[in-house]
């Protein structure tokens, strides 16, 4: 098994959910972004979802959009994102890494070249939100043949008729979008999360992680009680933004602003797990 299913399985055996953290590669600058990434596992992140900066991130709300703009302004590219993964892997061979983004930069880079370079850099999986199942031959199936997990999103509007197509070539885990909308713009109805996860799991043996709108330790606890994984992104990139100086540059507080929040969120996830295991 690759690092992703291995990590989910190990955490499940311990009776706890998997904590997935999202940051955008190169935000607010490549060096600071790498420092944040390197610090995430120690702060409690089980899986790192690394955004590939893009000028038109259609599924993302303002916080993640701004993080992409900051990264692009700082000179981050797709090649730079892969280089960041390689540097991370020089000191961490265990933490699963998922690249999240959109097909346009991959297409420009070249699909075959991208998949080979991603695998060689140490990437474990992909989330490419604008590649529907009907186009699996374009990226999904080649990615799987390369040894990368291809992770699909299911939403509150993905009904039982559509779900089998979404799940057909999904691997690693299923990402359940807990709101109808873009990232970071609404708070989910946490009372409905567990039933939504249960419905998806009637169609697949894959773990289900829940994200979009999870911002606080209380949110993380609520999701962890009914899902296999908890994904937090907008809150982390917003922590980066609010730590910057008046010119939008990193400060001595930028890395700790993220890791302090990750620590509090991971403690919340672990507390739920501890109760579940007892």
Image (tube, grey):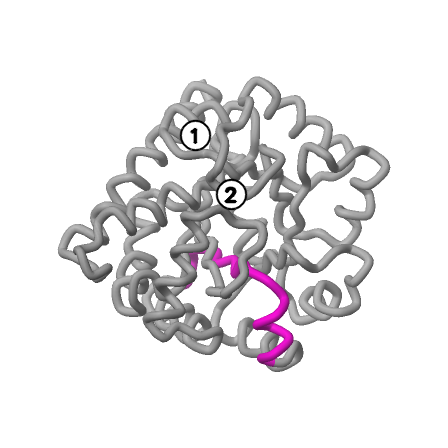
- From the viewer's side, name the closer residue of 200 and 41: 200
Residue 106 drawn above or below residue 226 = below
Mark 1 vs mark 2, foreground winner is 2
Q: Is residue 115 left or right of residue 123?
A: right
Indicate whether residue 223 is drawn in magenta: no
Q: Earlier in the sequence, mark 1 or mark 2?
A: 2
Residue 156 drawn above or below residue 81 = above
Residue 175 placement (x, y as % from top left): 61, 43
Residue 193 placement (x, y as % from top left): 59, 25
Callout 1 crowding tier (Cα within 10 Å): few <14, some 14–19, many ≥20: many
**Which residue in the structure is indicated by mark 2?**
183
Seen at 55% across and 60% down, the residue is 101
Which residue sits furthest front? 246
Residue 218 drawn above or below residue 244 = above
Do labels 1 and 2 touch, CB within 8 Å?
no
Range shown magenta: 93-109
Residue 153 placement (x, y as % from top left): 65, 46
- Quarter placement of the C terminus: top left
Residue 86 placement (x, y as % from top left): 41, 73
Seen at 75% across and 37% down, the residue is 158
Which residue sits furthest right? 161
**Which residue in the structure is indicated by mark 1?**
220
Q: CA distance from mark 1 to mark 2?
A: 15 Å
- From the viewer's side, name the closer residue of 164 and 59: 59
């Amino acid at each position: 098994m690759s690092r992703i299913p291995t990590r989910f399985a190990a955490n499940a055996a311990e009776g706890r959910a998997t904590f997935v953290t999202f940051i955008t590669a190169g935000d607010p600058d490549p060096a600071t972004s790498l420092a944040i990434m390197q610090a995430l596992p120690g702060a409690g992140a089980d899986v790192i979802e690394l955004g590939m900066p893009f000028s038109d991130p259609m599924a993302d709300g303002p916080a993640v959009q701004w993080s992409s703009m900051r990264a692009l302004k700082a000179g981050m590219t797709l090649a730079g994102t892969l280089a960041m993964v390689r540097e991370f892997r020089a000191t961490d061979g265990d933490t699963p890494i998922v690249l999240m983004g959109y097909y346009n930069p991959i297409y420009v880079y070249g699909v075959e070249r991208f998949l080979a370079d991603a695998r060689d850099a140490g990437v474990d999986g992909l989330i490419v939100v604008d590649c529907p199942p009907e186009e699996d031959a374009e990226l999904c199936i080649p990615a799987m043949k390369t040894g990368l997990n291809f992770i699909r999103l299911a939403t509150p509007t993905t009904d039982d008729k559509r779900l089998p197509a979404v799940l057909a070539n999904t691997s690693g885990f299923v990402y359940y979008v807990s709101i109808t909308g873009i990232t970071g713009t609404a708070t989910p109805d946490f009372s409905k999360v567990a039933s939504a996860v249960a419905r998806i799991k009637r169609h697949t043996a894959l773990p289900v992680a829940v994200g979009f709108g999870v911002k606080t330790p209380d949110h993380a606890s609520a999701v962890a009680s009914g899902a296999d994984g908890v994904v937090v992104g907008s809150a982390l990139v917003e922590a980066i933004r609010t730590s910057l100086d008046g010119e939008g540059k990193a400060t001595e507080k930028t890395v700790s602003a993220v890791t302090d929040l990750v620590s509090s969120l991971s403690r919340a996830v672990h507390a739920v797990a501890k109760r579940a295991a007892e």
